[in-house]
Image (cartoon, helix red, strand yellow):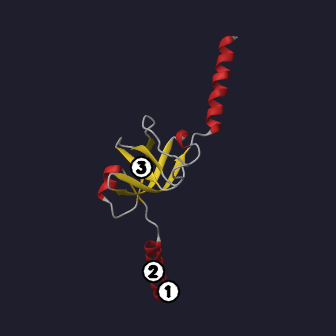
Amino acid sequence: MKKVHIIVLLLLAVTVGVILAMTGDYTTYANFVQAREKTDKSVNVVGYLAKNKPLNYDPQKDPNYFSFTMLDKEGNEQKVVYKGSKPQDFERSEQLVVKGRVNGDVFAASEISMKCPSKYVNDEITLKETTVSIKSGS
């Protein structure tokens, strides 16, 4: 290959890289303390439902208002408000990811993703416990 071809290919690769970088959706992961500092930017917070705190969802009163308390991975507690209906089996989720930004004293979530426990893992655990109890009972 000629030097000109190599230079043209390199310029083309750099151009494609710059275009992809500019159009990509960069999602920042943060805890609630960092999210308070980035009020101008949407962030993702990974954490867990504070099961000792109440969930606020009354579909008769307002079907598009759901609030709950969440703990991020560092243990920071924050009230989260989601303008939508409560996801099914929300209380059973193992882990939550909320996308949004801090608005005053609440985290205004635009999206909620849940990691729910797998029914297959629970079945395997039950099967092992049954197998162990059968062996030990013999």
Q: Amino acid at mark 1?
A: His
Residue at figure coordinates x 51%, y 40% from the top left: 94
Residue at figure coordinates x 48%, y 78% from the top left: 16
Specify the label residue 80 is tagged with.
Answer: 3
Location of mark 2 (residue)? 15
C-alpha gap between disc 3 and disc 2: 41 Å
Which SS class for mark 3?
strand
Residue 8 image offset from top left, x and y in percent: 47, 85
Residue 56 image offset from top left, x and y in percent: 47, 44
The reply to whether the C-beta atoms of the residues labelled 3 and 2 are less than 8 Å apart is no
The reply to whether the C-beta atoms of the residues labelled 3 and 1 are less than 8 Å apart is no
Q: Residues within 10 Å of mark 1 (few under 14, many from 20)?
A: few
Task: Tell me which label, 3 or 2, sits earlier in the chain.
Answer: 2
Which SS class for mark 2?
helix
Residue 70 image offset from top left, x and y in percent: 42, 44
Q: Amino acid at mark 3?
A: Val
Residue 30 image offset from top left, x and y in percent: 37, 53
Q: Nearer the viewer, mark 3 or mark 1?
A: 3
Which is nearer the eye, 99 or 14? 99
Specify the label residue 85 is tagged with.
Answer: none
Location of mark 1 (residue)? 5
